[in-house]
Structures are given as C-alpha cells and as structure tokens.
Amino acid sequence: MLLFIAYESLSSIYLFLPPLFAILFVFFINAVKKEDGVEIFLISLCLLVYESQMGFPVFSSIIYFGMIYKFVMPKLKKNFDCRSCIKVASVILSYFGFYLFLVLVSNIFLIPMPSINYYMLYYIVIEFFIVSIL
C-alpha cells in the first residue's frame, strides 16, 4: 500500500504513468469474490488516495465499484465467454463508466463536473496490458 501511495504521487506529477485505477478495480473484484475483508479495506484505502489525488468525491469509486460488481459484471460474464473480452470491458468500465458516474453525481449534487483528458485512452491501453498479465 505504501508503494501504491508513492506511485500515485508520482503518477500525478508524471502523466505518462497510469494511475492504476483499472488494476484496483480488478483487485477489488477478486477481493469481493474471496470475501477477504482486509484486502477490501486496503484496496478501499488505495481508492481513497486516488480520489484525493484527483479531487473526486469521497467514496465515489468504492460505491461505483460495488455497483458495477453487483449489477454489471454478472451480465458481462453471462454474455461473454472469453476472458480477454471481460478484461477489456472491465478496464473500459473502470475509466469511462466511472467518468459517467461522476457526471451523474455532479448533476445530482450540483458540484463541478469532472474534466476528461485524452490521457485516459493511453491509460486504458497500458492498463489493459497490465490486467491481461494478472
């Protein structure tokens, strides 16, 4: 976790380093499947660090990951048989879906909308390769 905090600080300075958001999504899904409370807690702390670095609302990523795990991932696994398709979908869901979730939250609570940058496409490609290794 300390390495993640140091890496997250570096990734906010050096934009070519991906923030590992999709990796945390995959770890979160695996931890919930195993029902490992300590691992879920540590991943949640990492997500809180990510949210504070990016200026997102507190607990928004944890709520989003929980909703995606409960409602969307079973449908994806039911409709797709290939593992790589599910991995691609999970990486895309983690970035674009979270952005759309933040837009919805910002409209509901009348807070400023998050900005989207073109580095997200780069992050999706890099993190897809990392997730495919996992």
Image (spheres, grey):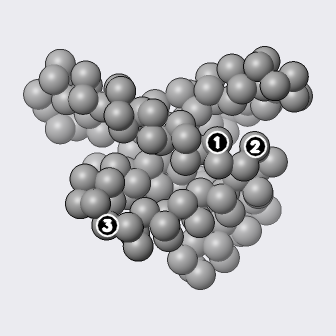
> Mark 2: which secondary structure?
loop
Q: Position of residue 108 (x, y in %)?
A: 76, 19
Residue 123 position (above or below residue 7):
above
**Kind of residue sitting beneath label 3:** Asp
Check disc 3 and report the residue beneath it: 36
Residue under numbered circle 2: 57
Relative horizontal placement of residue 92, taking residue 3 as reference (left or right): left
Q: Mark 1 points at which residue?
A: 60
Q: What residue type is labelled 2?
A: Pro
Kindly identify the residue that appears in the image at 44 percent across and 49 percent down: 25
Disc 1 versus disc 2: distance between alpha carbons? 6 Å
Q: Distance between the residues labelled 3 and 2?
A: 25 Å
Tell me whether circle 1 and circle 2 mark residues in contact (CB < 8 Å). yes
- The residue depicted at 47 percent of the width and 41 percent of the height is 65
Quadrant holding the N terminus: bottom right
Can residue 119 be seen from the camera position used here? yes
Secondary structure under the numbered disc 3 in the rendered image = loop
Image coordinates of residue 7 in percent, x first then y, are 63, 71
Assess disc 3: are there few (<14), some (14-19) or many (≥20) residues with their C-alpha within 10 Å of its C-alpha: few
In primary-sequence order, the first of circles 3 and 2 is: 3
**CA distance separating discs 1 and 3:** 21 Å
Residue 121 appears in the figure: no
For the residue pair 44 and 119, the one nearer the viewer reads as: 44
Q: Residues within 10 Å of mark 2 (few under 14, many from 20)?
A: some
Q: Quadrant of the C terminus?
A: bottom left
Q: Residue at x 56, y 28 (%)?
A: 96
Image: 121 above or below 58 = above
Element class at badge 1: helix
From the viewer's perspective, tell me whether residue 121 is left or right of residue 30: right
